[in-house]
Each structure stands twice: as C-alpha cells, then as structure tokens.
Amino acid sequence: MSFVKDWPRHGAALALLIAAAGCVPAAGTGATPAPAPSIDPVPAKAEAPAPTPPHAPLRPDFTLAGIAEQGAVMVGRVPSETRALALDGLPIPVAADGGFLIAFDRDAPAAARLVATLADGREVVRTIAVAPGRWRIEHIDAPYRGSASSDAEFQRRRPAELAEIAAARAVPVESDGWRQAFRWPVAGRLSGFFGSQRVYQGKPGSYHSGTDVAVPAGTPFVAPADGVVTLAASAPFTLEGNLLIVDHGMGLSSAFLHCQRLDVRVGDRVVQGQKLGTVGRTGRATGPHMHWGLKWRDARLDPAKLAGPIAR
C-alpha cells in the first residue's frame, strides 16, 4: 500500500493521534492552543559556607599528671589564655602548647600554690597537697672530704667545683626530654637510695642527693632522656669524680657521678638510650657504681619516681 496515495485517510488518523498525545490541538476541535510555559532560569546553586576550623577546647583549669610528693615531678597544661605561671611565687616557663613541669624538693613543704595569670588579668589558682617522702639513714665508711688528701685541700678545691656545677645548671637549654618517660641509665643492684642521710665515719653529712646502682667498673651507661650536655668534667672533682650533667629542658637535669670515662662533650645533644660513658669509682666512692642525681632548679628529686622500678 502506498502511504502517499492513501494520505487523505492516513493523514487524518495521524492528526488525531498527535492531538491525543497533546503535542498540537486536534483539527476541527476549536481548541485554543495552550501558551508555552514560561521557563525561568535555574538559579545558581549557592555554595555552602566553608566549615569553621575546629578550635582546641578551652581549658578553664590546670591539667596535672604525676605524683604530688617530696622528690617527685608533675607535668601539666595551663588554662587557656595563660600569660604567666608561678609556683609559690617562682616563675615557671610554659611551652608553646601550654605544657609545663614542676617538681618538689626532698624537703618540700606540705602544700604548694600554683597560679596562672590569664590575659585578662584573672588568676586560676590550684593548691597542691605534697605528700611526705620516707628516707633512710646510712652509715658510710668513707672520708667526708672524698678524694682530697686533707680537709684543707678539700676546702681549697670545693668552691671552684661548686661554681662550675652551678654555672652548668644555669645554662638555658631547649629540649623536650622532660616530656619523655625516663629510663634508668644502667641496670643493676640499688646500693644507695635518694633522700637517705649519710654518716661518713661518724660525721653526719647531707642527705644522699641521688640513687646509686652497683655495677662493675667499665659498664656503659646511657641517657635516661633526650637532652644537652652542660658539664663534662675535664678532671675528677673531689666528691663527684668524673662528673657529667645533661639538661633535659624546663630546668630538669641529670647528673652522673664517679664515672670512669665520658664519651660526650659540653654542647652535645644526646638522645634517650645513647651511650654517655662508663661507670667507675672516681671521687668519693667505696666501690664502682653509678650515682644518678636529678634536679629541677634547686629541688633535688628521686630518680626512682621518674624511671620506675629498676631492671636487674
């Protein structure tokens, strides 16, 4: 069948089909064409505002960790917007992230007052109850003057030695060693305990300012934490012998006494676990051992309270 030939009949049917589909009005219906719907331009999608960067939560008070006890150390963070910190009126340095360190001497009083001054002048105050330590009395069969040949020689040499030690402890040091978990510089038998008062051949001396570990001479010892060497004795001191001091930052320092040999120099940066020298019996010592002393500013501290139990 020819579509052109049968156009009159097929054309009418096509017109009715299109009208039914709604594309154009059907012929002969008299319907008015519906106006084309107006199309408004689609508005551009508004961009979501950039998220506000998260802020560190405000600290309205101190956070403190550690033991509030004679001979112990505490670390913490200051309240937000702190501009100055003091412990019993002594200014305390604060790290960029708000961290700080405080410690309590072997004879510290029963309470300490921590004060943060905020940017607006307000103060945040924390009173810390300091628990007492328990100390021993030890009798030592060694002369009080140490390696000096006489009391007169001891009196002559000692002031210069003390001045050298004080100068080393006054050196400002940037180190984060104070943030680390301390380790023992050497493992062995504890032969002397921090805080115990010593009596030298019947003459009372000051309390023991460190902890002694008895090991054979020549045993290597290592850094208990990161730090900077501020003193490496060029000749044995009367009492300390070959003395090494490492500052761990924030005023916390380690002293290693009676060493046989020192393997580091003043100004060296050391890392935790690095070999520093070997154990000996120089200075006032009855046998080879490592005397490890810890000090925060003028406060003498118990190494066992930072390093925990010692391995044997």
Image (cartoon, rainbow, N blue to C red):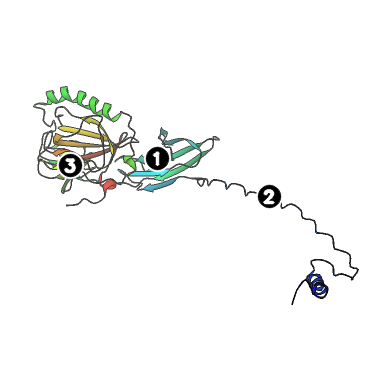
Residue 149 found in image quarter: top left
Say what secondary structure mark 3 lies in.
strand
Question: Dot 1: within a 10 Å radius of its alpha carbon, few (fewer than 14), some, or many (20 or more) residues?
Answer: many
The residue located at (43%, 37%) in the rendering is 96
**Residue 48 left/right relative to 40:** left
Q: Which label sits in the foreground, 2 or 1?
A: 2
* Residue 224 x %, y %: 25, 43
* Residue 188 x %, y %: 15, 48
Question: Is 181 or 47 nearer to us in this picture?
Answer: 47
> Do callouts 3 and 2 mark residues in contact (Cβ within 8 Å)?
no
Say what secondary structure mark 1 lies in.
strand
> Do callouts 3 and 1 mark residues in contact (Cβ within 8 Å)?
no
Distance CA(mark 2)–CA(mark 1): 53 Å
- Residue type highlighted by circle 3: Phe
Say which quadrant the N terminus sits in. Answer: bottom right
Q: Is 78 drawn above or below residue 145 in the view shown?
A: below
The disc placed on residue 44 is 2
The disc placed on residue 221 is 3
* Residue 251 x %, y %: 33, 35
**Residue 12 left/right relative to 234:** right
Residue 128: tell me if it is visible.
yes
Distance CA(mark 3)–CA(mark 2): 71 Å
Q: Which label sits in the foreground, 3 or 2?
A: 2
Which badge, 2 or 1, comes first in the chain's sequence? 2
